[in-house]
Amino acid sequence: MKLLFLFAQFFKIGLFSIGGGYATLPFLYEMADKASDEWLSAEKIGDMLAVAQSLPGAIGVNLSAYTGFQYAGIPGGFIAALGLVSPSIIIIVIIARLLNAFKESKTVAALFAGFRPAGAGLLSAAALGALAVSLYNPAAETWTAMLRRRECILFAVLFFLVYKFKKHPVVYIAIAGIAGVVLGL
Protein backbone atom coordinates (compact mmCIF):
# COMPACT_ATOMS: atom_id res chain seq x y z
CA MET A 1 0.00 0.00 0.00
CA LYS A 2 2.89 2.37 0.79
CA LEU A 3 4.39 1.79 -2.66
CA LEU A 4 1.09 2.49 -4.41
CA PHE A 5 0.71 5.67 -2.35
CA LEU A 6 4.23 6.79 -3.32
CA PHE A 7 3.71 6.03 -7.00
CA ALA A 8 0.39 7.92 -7.07
CA GLN A 9 1.78 10.94 -5.21
CA PHE A 10 4.88 11.23 -7.35
CA PHE A 11 2.94 10.54 -10.56
CA LYS A 12 0.80 13.56 -9.63
CA ILE A 13 3.91 15.60 -8.86
CA GLY A 14 5.54 14.56 -12.14
CA LEU A 15 2.37 15.44 -14.04
CA PHE A 16 2.08 18.97 -12.67
CA SER A 17 5.63 20.08 -11.81
CA ILE A 18 6.52 21.97 -14.97
CA GLY A 19 9.98 23.51 -14.82
CA GLY A 20 12.23 20.81 -13.43
CA GLY A 21 13.22 19.46 -10.05
CA TYR A 22 12.77 22.65 -8.07
CA ALA A 23 9.16 22.79 -9.23
CA THR A 24 8.51 19.61 -7.23
CA LEU A 25 9.21 21.41 -3.95
CA PRO A 26 5.75 22.99 -3.48
CA PHE A 27 4.21 19.53 -3.90
CA LEU A 28 6.66 18.03 -1.40
CA TYR A 29 5.83 20.77 1.12
CA GLU A 30 2.14 19.97 0.61
CA MET A 31 2.89 16.28 1.25
CA ALA A 32 4.77 17.27 4.40
CA ASP A 33 1.79 19.27 5.64
CA LYS A 34 -0.49 16.25 5.14
CA ALA A 35 1.93 13.63 6.50
CA SER A 36 0.36 11.93 9.49
CA ASP A 37 3.68 11.10 11.10
CA GLU A 38 7.10 12.76 11.06
CA TRP A 39 8.57 10.84 8.08
CA LEU A 40 8.37 14.06 6.03
CA SER A 41 8.66 17.64 7.27
CA ALA A 42 9.72 21.03 5.89
CA GLU A 43 13.03 20.69 7.72
CA LYS A 44 13.64 17.25 6.17
CA ILE A 45 12.80 18.61 2.72
CA GLY A 46 15.51 21.26 3.20
CA ASP A 47 17.98 18.52 4.10
CA MET A 48 16.85 16.39 1.16
CA LEU A 49 17.29 19.34 -1.19
CA ALA A 50 20.87 19.79 -0.01
CA VAL A 51 21.58 16.10 -0.62
CA ALA A 52 19.76 16.07 -3.98
CA GLN A 53 21.78 19.05 -5.24
CA SER A 54 25.07 17.43 -4.33
CA LEU A 55 24.32 14.13 -6.08
CA PRO A 56 24.67 13.58 -9.81
CA GLY A 57 21.44 13.43 -11.74
CA ALA A 58 18.21 15.33 -11.95
CA ILE A 59 17.21 17.09 -8.74
CA GLY A 60 13.57 16.04 -9.02
CA VAL A 61 14.50 12.38 -9.41
CA ASN A 62 16.97 12.64 -6.53
CA LEU A 63 14.33 14.29 -4.31
CA SER A 64 11.70 11.72 -5.19
CA ALA A 65 14.04 8.77 -4.66
CA TYR A 66 15.21 10.16 -1.32
CA THR A 67 11.64 10.86 -0.19
CA GLY A 68 10.52 7.39 -1.24
CA PHE A 69 13.49 5.84 0.54
CA GLN A 70 12.60 7.73 3.74
CA TYR A 71 9.04 6.39 3.56
CA ALA A 72 9.47 2.81 2.30
CA GLY A 73 13.16 1.96 1.94
CA ILE A 74 14.87 1.04 -1.34
CA PRO A 75 11.67 -0.11 -3.10
CA GLY A 76 10.05 3.19 -2.08
CA GLY A 77 12.90 5.18 -3.58
CA PHE A 78 12.63 3.30 -6.86
CA ILE A 79 8.82 3.55 -7.04
CA ALA A 80 8.78 7.27 -6.18
CA ALA A 81 11.35 8.04 -8.89
CA LEU A 82 9.42 5.90 -11.38
CA GLY A 83 6.20 7.70 -10.47
CA LEU A 84 7.86 11.08 -10.99
CA VAL A 85 9.24 10.34 -14.47
CA SER A 86 6.30 8.29 -15.81
CA PRO A 87 4.08 11.27 -16.73
CA SER A 88 6.95 12.92 -18.59
CA ILE A 89 7.64 9.80 -20.61
CA ILE A 90 3.96 9.36 -21.47
CA ILE A 91 3.49 13.03 -22.36
CA ILE A 92 6.67 13.20 -24.46
CA VAL A 93 5.64 10.15 -26.48
CA ILE A 94 2.18 11.64 -27.11
CA ILE A 95 3.56 15.09 -27.96
CA ALA A 96 6.19 13.66 -30.29
CA ARG A 97 3.48 11.84 -32.20
CA LEU A 98 1.17 14.86 -32.38
CA LEU A 99 3.67 17.68 -32.78
CA ASN A 100 4.30 17.12 -36.48
CA ALA A 101 0.58 17.47 -37.16
CA PHE A 102 0.33 20.72 -35.17
CA LYS A 103 3.77 22.30 -35.56
CA GLU A 104 2.34 25.34 -37.39
CA SER A 105 -0.56 25.86 -34.98
CA LYS A 106 -0.74 29.21 -33.19
CA THR A 107 -2.63 27.56 -30.34
CA VAL A 108 0.19 25.09 -29.70
CA ALA A 109 2.75 27.91 -29.80
CA ALA A 110 0.64 29.91 -27.32
CA LEU A 111 0.32 26.84 -25.07
CA PHE A 112 4.08 26.41 -24.88
CA ALA A 113 4.53 30.16 -24.36
CA GLY A 114 2.20 29.87 -21.35
CA PHE A 115 4.27 27.05 -19.85
CA ARG A 116 7.36 29.25 -19.49
CA PRO A 117 5.94 31.77 -16.97
CA ALA A 118 4.17 28.93 -15.12
CA GLY A 119 7.51 27.15 -14.76
CA ALA A 120 9.20 30.36 -13.63
CA GLY A 121 6.47 30.92 -11.03
CA LEU A 122 6.77 27.39 -9.67
CA LEU A 123 10.56 27.68 -9.52
CA SER A 124 10.34 31.04 -7.74
CA ALA A 125 7.88 29.70 -5.17
CA ALA A 126 10.14 26.71 -4.55
CA ALA A 127 13.19 28.95 -4.16
CA LEU A 128 11.38 31.18 -1.66
CA GLY A 129 10.22 28.10 0.27
CA ALA A 130 13.77 26.71 0.41
CA LEU A 131 15.05 30.13 1.46
CA ALA A 132 12.50 30.33 4.28
CA VAL A 133 13.33 26.84 5.56
CA SER A 134 17.05 27.63 5.50
CA LEU A 135 17.08 31.13 6.97
CA TYR A 136 13.93 31.48 9.08
CA ASN A 137 13.47 29.99 12.55
CA PRO A 138 9.73 29.74 13.27
CA ALA A 139 10.38 28.41 16.80
CA ALA A 140 12.21 31.58 17.84
CA GLU A 141 11.00 33.11 21.07
CA THR A 142 11.83 36.70 20.11
CA TRP A 143 11.50 38.51 16.81
CA THR A 144 15.26 39.20 16.78
CA ALA A 145 15.99 35.46 16.75
CA MET A 146 13.67 34.67 13.84
CA LEU A 147 16.47 34.90 11.30
CA ARG A 148 19.25 32.38 11.53
CA ARG A 149 22.15 34.82 11.43
CA ARG A 150 25.00 32.44 10.54
CA GLU A 151 22.92 30.83 7.81
CA CYS A 152 22.02 34.27 6.44
CA ILE A 153 25.68 35.28 6.31
CA LEU A 154 26.61 32.00 4.60
CA PHE A 155 23.76 32.49 2.12
CA ALA A 156 24.92 36.04 1.31
CA VAL A 157 28.56 34.97 0.88
CA LEU A 158 27.67 32.01 -1.35
CA PHE A 159 25.21 34.09 -3.37
CA PHE A 160 27.95 36.66 -4.00
CA LEU A 161 30.51 33.97 -4.90
CA VAL A 162 28.15 32.22 -7.32
CA TYR A 163 27.14 35.51 -8.93
CA LYS A 164 30.70 36.86 -9.18
CA PHE A 165 32.85 33.84 -10.05
CA LYS A 166 30.50 31.31 -11.73
CA LYS A 167 32.49 28.20 -10.79
CA HIS A 168 31.18 24.65 -10.90
CA PRO A 169 28.38 24.04 -8.34
CA VAL A 170 30.46 21.37 -6.61
CA VAL A 171 32.88 24.11 -5.50
CA TYR A 172 30.08 25.97 -3.74
CA ILE A 173 28.62 22.80 -2.25
CA ALA A 174 32.05 21.98 -0.82
CA ILE A 175 32.42 25.51 0.56
CA ALA A 176 28.95 25.32 2.13
CA GLY A 177 29.65 21.91 3.66
CA ILE A 178 32.93 23.03 5.16
CA ALA A 179 31.35 26.24 6.44
CA GLY A 180 28.50 24.20 7.96
CA VAL A 181 30.96 22.06 9.88
CA VAL A 182 33.15 25.00 10.95
CA LEU A 183 30.19 27.17 11.99
CA GLY A 184 28.36 24.26 13.63
CA LEU A 185 25.19 24.69 11.60
Image (cartoon, rainbow, N blue to C red):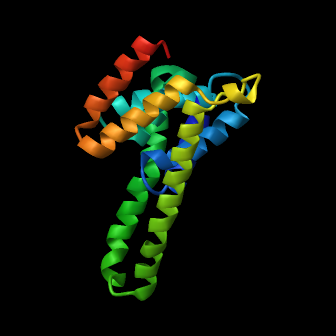
Residue 136 on image: x %, y % = 62, 32
Residue 59 on image: x %, y % = 39, 39
Picture quarter with the N terminus = top right
Residue 52 on image: x %, y % = 40, 32
Residue 33 placement, left or right of 125:
right
Q: Is residue 8 visible?
A: no
Most foreground residue, 29 or 153 = 153
Marks counted in the figure total 0
Residue 133 on image: x %, y % = 59, 33
Q: Is residue 32 above or below residue 122?
A: above
Most foreground residue, 179 or 105 = 179
Most foreground residue, 145 or 29 = 145
Q: Is residue 18 above or below residue 71?
A: below
Quadrant of residue 41 within the rendered picture: top right
Q: Is residue 23 visible?
A: yes
Quadrant of residue 182 within the rendered picture: top left
Quadrant of residue 89 within the rendered picture: bottom left
Most foreground residue, 60 or 140 = 140
Residue at point 47% right, 25% down? 75
Q: Residue furthest right?
A: 141
Residue at point 45% right, 22% down? 74
Q: Is residue 137 above or below residue 64?
A: above
Residue 124 placement, left or right of 143:
left
